[in-house]
Amino acid sequence: MTGVAAGDRVEAELVITGMTCGSCAARIERRLNRLDGVSATVNYATGRAYFTSLGGRDAPELIGVINSTGYRAELPAPPEEEGGATPAPRRGTWAAGSSSARRSPRS
């Protein structure tokens, strides 16, 4: 889990999918902040929720709340170690000098 636990305090990050606008993020944020001891912010642009929980609430419980709201939440994937495999080039990107690049109109 991405986060810090100290005593009864839990700080973590969740990945949320299914949001289509800022209102979706606001809806999830309101729902989480209604829970006793939870302070949450949801960022539509990054698709992430950040929360601090006091009083024993943990990430699986908040994931359940988000899922019951109609969205999908999960813990972020653990970071990859340095020196790992090089990621493959993205599809649909154009290399400089590509023959498919836009040509200037002839006069």
Image: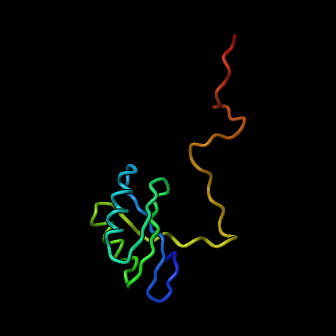
Give 70 or 22, whichever is nearer the viewer.
Answer: 22
Picture coordinates of residue 97 (x, y %)? 72, 35
Query: Is 106 situated left or right of 7 in this image?
Result: right
Picture coordinates of residue 23 (x, y %)? 36, 51
- For the point 65% across and 31% down, the residue is 101
- For the point 52% across and 75% down, the residue is 2
Q: Quadrant of residue 63?
A: bottom left
Residue lying furthest top:
107
Placement of 19 over or under 107, stated as above or below: below
Query: Is 81 situated left or right of 39 in this image?
Result: right
Residue lying furthest right:
97
- For the point 70% across and 10% down, the residue is 107
Placement of 28 over or under 58, stated as above or below: above
Give 42 or 105, whichever is nearer the viewer.
Answer: 42
Give 100 or 46, whichever is nearer the viewer.
Answer: 46
Picture coordinates of residue 84 (x, y %)? 66, 69
Query: Is 85 situated left or right of 25 in this image?
Result: right
Q: Quadrant of residue 74?
A: bottom left
Picture coordinates of residue 72 (x, y %)? 35, 63
Give 81 or 66, whichever is nearer the viewer.
Answer: 66
Count of all numbered marks drawn on residues in the image: 0
Coloring scheme used: rainbow
- For the point 42% across and 78% down, the residue is 53
Residue lying furthest bottom:
7
